[in-house]
Image: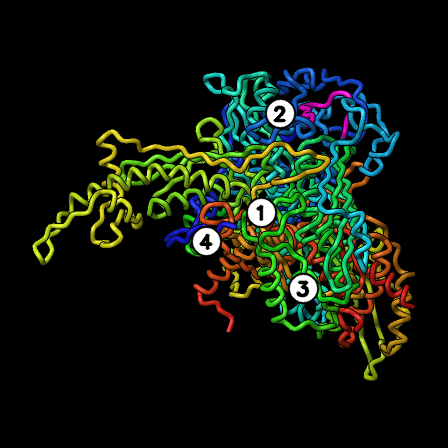
Amino acid sequence: MSNLLPLTLKVNGEEKTFLASPHASLLRVLRDNYYWDVKCGCEEGDCGTCTVLLDGKAVKSCITLAHNCAGHEVWTDKGLGYNDEITRMIQDAFVECGSIQCGFCTPGMIVAAKHYIDHGGIADRKEIRKAISGNLCRCTGYNKIVDAIYKVAVELGREVR
Amino acid sequence: MKNFEFIKAPDVKAALALLDKEKDHAYLVAGSTNAMVDIRAGKVNDRTLIGIRDIDALSGIKFSRGKITIGAGTTISEIANSALLAKKAPALFQAANDFADPTTRNSATIGGNIANASPAADTAPPLLALKAEVIIAKKGSKRRVPMEDFFLGVNKTVLEKDELILAVEFSANPHSAFYKVGLRNAMAISVVTAAASVRKDRDGKITDVAIALGSVAPKPVRAYNAEKAVLGKKLDDKVIADLMKAVAKDISPIDDVRASAEYRKDVAPVIVKRVLCKSCGICANEGGTK
Amino acid sequence: MTITEKKNFRLVGNRVPRHDAIAKARGEQLYSDDWVMPNMLYGKVLRSKYPSAILKGIDTSKAKALPGVHAVLTWEDVPLNQEVTKFGQMRDVGGGFEGLYKVLAHGKIRSKAEPIALVAAETQELAEEACKLIEVDYEVTEGVYDPREALKDGAYLVSSEDDTNRIMDTMIRMGDVDSAWDKCDLIVENDFYATPHDHAYLETESGMAWIDENGVITMRVGTQVLEHYRTIANVMKMPHTKIRNMGVPMGGGFGGKEDITVETFLCLLTAATRRPVKMVWSREESIECHSKRHPEYLHYKTGVTKDGHVVAQEVNIVLDGGSYTYCTPWVQMYSTMNGAGCYHFPNSRCTSVSAFTNNTFSSANRGFGATQTNFSYDRQMDIIAKKLGMSPYEFRRMNVLRNGDPQHTGFVPQGHVALTELLDVVWEKLNEVPKVDYLPDGRKFGRGIACAQMGYGRLCFLHDNSRVALRLELDGTVTLRAGVPDLGGGQGSVLAQIAAEEFGLPIEDVHPYVMDTHLTPLCGTTTATRQLYMSGNACIEACKPLKAALARKAAEIIKATWWPVTTEAGYEWEPDIANIEGQLEFHDRKIYYAPDPQKCVDFKTVVAHISNEGGELFNEGQFNAPAVEVPDLSDIKGQILPDMTYTCHGVDVAVDEETGEYEILRLIAAIDCGKAINRNSCEGQVEGGAIYNLGWVREDLHWENGITKANNFSTYLIPTAVDAPDVETILLESRGGIGPYGAKGVGEPADNSICPATVNALSDAVGVEFFCTNVKPEDVLKAIKEKNKKNK
């Protein structure tokens, strides 16, 4: 069996050192250490439920080699919600717009939305749909998820004129 | 049982030294979007994973004297968002925008995409059509391999165990285009892809052309017969018909879970027509034949 | 028809945020895979290598010898390896409805999903390794993979317990079909095929179990059917009191978590090791091993007059039940019920038969047998309309069921039948965009419409019921307890909303505690689009006596506070208590005397008075659905389901005629929901349902002789955000349902007419009829090529 190696990451603002197999995914390291908001839906990069921010960019943690992230900064939906105003706005919009049904895709979806807004995302339904196209949702049909992200973009003055 | 080691390479020199040392055991990992899937499936085991995600020198898009150089570690996102490539290599730009999904594109790299050598690799047809060269290094030496010689078969390339892709390089060509047929609009492995690049003289005659296809053979292929059908000619209905007919000779598709060989044979000529027309600045009806 | 009395709503009908939404948004909701315990082991199932075989022997010695492995179990280790399947019903219906449930393989292996052995080990990786070390001796058999083949004489027998592959036969008839064909000017016959369909919820089956300090095997497993604890207890040969599931919200269910998933495996492993055990299925295991929507082969023969009146219809259905019975008989009832569709055929006959095959077992999937027939009858109606030269809208409108029309069993539903209104509103909305032949970009344009009916509430012969408990707290808030499994539809939250409406409290004052087999009153299954209807009504029942007590006490307080009143004439006026009580309104945390709202009292003050006097602050209410006897399956008559919900979908498509690729340009989804309780949730069901079965048109499991080739999310392709159009939702609110405030159930009906509407639109675009639910670009191109060949 593979040896466990120490891995230092900054997770949700805190510097942490974990022990992880050389081949462990970032998803496994996070979940093994109780970051339960990072969901596992397929473990092959095909569903997006495990999406986190790595150095400010949305990535799928299941297809991210954990040790490759040593020394880098990871944020999850839960950590962002308590530290970042934009994420909190997105979370509130999801609640208000009825964007959440089973909620299993929600944390990853919110991180993808956060990436979109952070990178200048505008209030355009087509663009929003593209931005979340790596995140599957089986419950909502996406309408109300798009509504929520659109609402945040409008609140930030990103209307398309 | 899964059995791995991990070593992070801080720079190219270190990566080459590690490759030299580990040889058969070495397994390079950049964006890891393919590697993690293969490790989970047990397709890869007993290896030393060499982490190259953090090597800055491998990343970036440069343009100088008509040549575009893209570092192997450049993410597909960077390509998909590059205003330079949108203008000077629209085929590659489009392929990057059709690649998987925006989140996967933030990790996946162009070097990883070609090194994995999937017949469906989305960046392969545009790089073939742009007649790119792959710049490869190993400890103590460098070499350049034309894209058309790079792929050997399914997941097979000319890369030696101790080699690392540094970059891909090609001449800018705004007259290039890409088209993907997939079963979904995102996160879809391609059913067929095509890319083309052309150069024309003042009369509109095609003086130089390269056409490439993905998912129609064990490796991404150049469509030499199709190219022959249009080289030195002006595009008209007859030439287009010849072109479409010629495509059949360039491909050998198979049935798989995504589509039948027959469908691929039907669609490949259509999308070759579309990318060629688009490269020539003719508005090929993307929606069909009205 | 009942139209429920109108009421001024303050909360019902609004877009109320669900009680659990904030936790889900902030990443704080825990699911079945988010629990660990000290000293916990990991469980793993070894599945069959072959879809069809005889199990000759299992050697577990090498697996057991692996350090870190604590249990390897086979059928011999299961206290009761064979039981009958139940789905939470309160009444044994036996007969063909309750098939064999086998925990671990023994005798014939019926599908590749068949569990052979269970392992518990220190790590997930060790458990996987141990599975590889189990040596299984298989005698591979040929198997049978098509139910039509399975029904033939001499077919391979799937089961070692039965002497036939036939599961059940059913028939419903009306009028006299055989003599009605003579009255028809046009008779159209077609064969349809509905493909298997995966639920593809994003959370795979998972959970954990442990033995508590009192010897109770306790689980944390998300399930649609908490009542499975009874079957699990039977399997463990333990009393029903000693198996508990502290249910967990599901990451989606759609019928796929209606059968037992990980529960028995976890209980067996935890009992064997005396340690907590966790089990999580991989995506591949999930797709390969949980139920599928029944593949159905349907033959339709339909006769009409030349002026477009439907006269007669004969339907023959063959259902692929797969490896075990599970929900097949129930699904078959729905298919048979809906066979003739939502049209007024004076003469109809629908016969159906189900069979075992060596495919993965078929069971519940959102739509439950209604979707397969709906696809077929509404394709059939489209084809006939074209042959008659009528518009698909006119032809349907002429023939759909209306209020007072009997269903094909002769039963006249009590609820409102909104099919004509729905057709009108969708057709009008579609035509806001003029129909064209080709789009400017060269793509061919197509337009389709379809309508459907589907029941809500369970089959009436199951004698379904539900119960909800309420407790008034001394600060004026309310605790609600209900054993309602929440699979994402907001099943728990809506009950809080109803209680808050009834008591005149803001939503945050009512907190629902849900889903614990032994601490919350059992609400029955979250299946059959029944929770709002059943538990919503139970919640209102629970409120009634508490409201009566509150009103009586409030009337006393109000009278004592505000009366007597001296009028200008010097006359002292005082109403009696009953008069005040009859005119009270509950809102804004107060109880008001409606004729003079100045006269009011705080809700919590009233609660305090009742408490001081030793009055009851707790009540459990029960609601019973209409109950009938099990019908004669060879001639089903009367009421089968409590009521029906009606839908209509309109779709515009653009087809690339050179590649077969197509895009859904518009999707209009209309439903008569009776009354929307939570508008966001109701729309969410309609939107989600539409995209769920829009996906069915493209999703393909690639079954090949019992093997699921598309067993992950890179091959089984559900719609992404860029494949789904914006759904234009239209909610009609007739108030004509039998749920709370006239509501109807929407969860499953929401995914009905979408599939035929989409395929009708594709047929309209390319001028070729499609007979399979699955129409991929490749199929479209093939159809176009064949048409062109014919036309040449």
Magenta residues, start to end: C99-110
Q: Earlier in the sequence, mark 2 or mark 3?
A: 2
Residue type at the position of mark 1 = Pro
Q: Is residue C606 left or right of residue B96?
A: left
Amino acid under label 2?
A: Phe
Nearer to us of marks 2 and 4 is 2
Residue, disc 2: C265
Helix, strand or loop status at disc 1: loop
| In front: label 3 or label 1 | 1
Judge depth for marks 4 and 3 and give the one in front.
3
Q: Which mark is residue A87?
A: 4
- Give x and y (percent) for residue B261: 86, 53
User: Residue C406's x, y, as percent?
Assistant: 63, 48
Which of these two is toward me, B12 or C462?
A: C462
* Most foreground residue, C181 or A150: C181
What numbered label is drawn on residue C413?
1
Q: Position of residue A38 (x, y in %)?
A: 53, 43
Q: Hey, what amino acid is under mark 3? A: Tyr
Whole-number angstrom distance, CA of label 2 to CA of label 3 = 51 Å
Secondary element at image label 3: helix
Q: Is residue B149 above or below residue C212?
A: below
Q: Which mark is residue C257?
A: none
Q: Residue furthest bottom?
A: B203
Task: Decide which of tag 3 and tag 1 comes sooner along the chain.
Answer: 3
**Crowd tier of the residue under label 4, counting other residues whose Cα lies within 10 Å: few below 14, some 14–19, many 20 or above:** many
- Between label 2 and label 3, give the one nearer the viewer: 3
Q: Determine the chain carrying the residue at label 3.
A: C
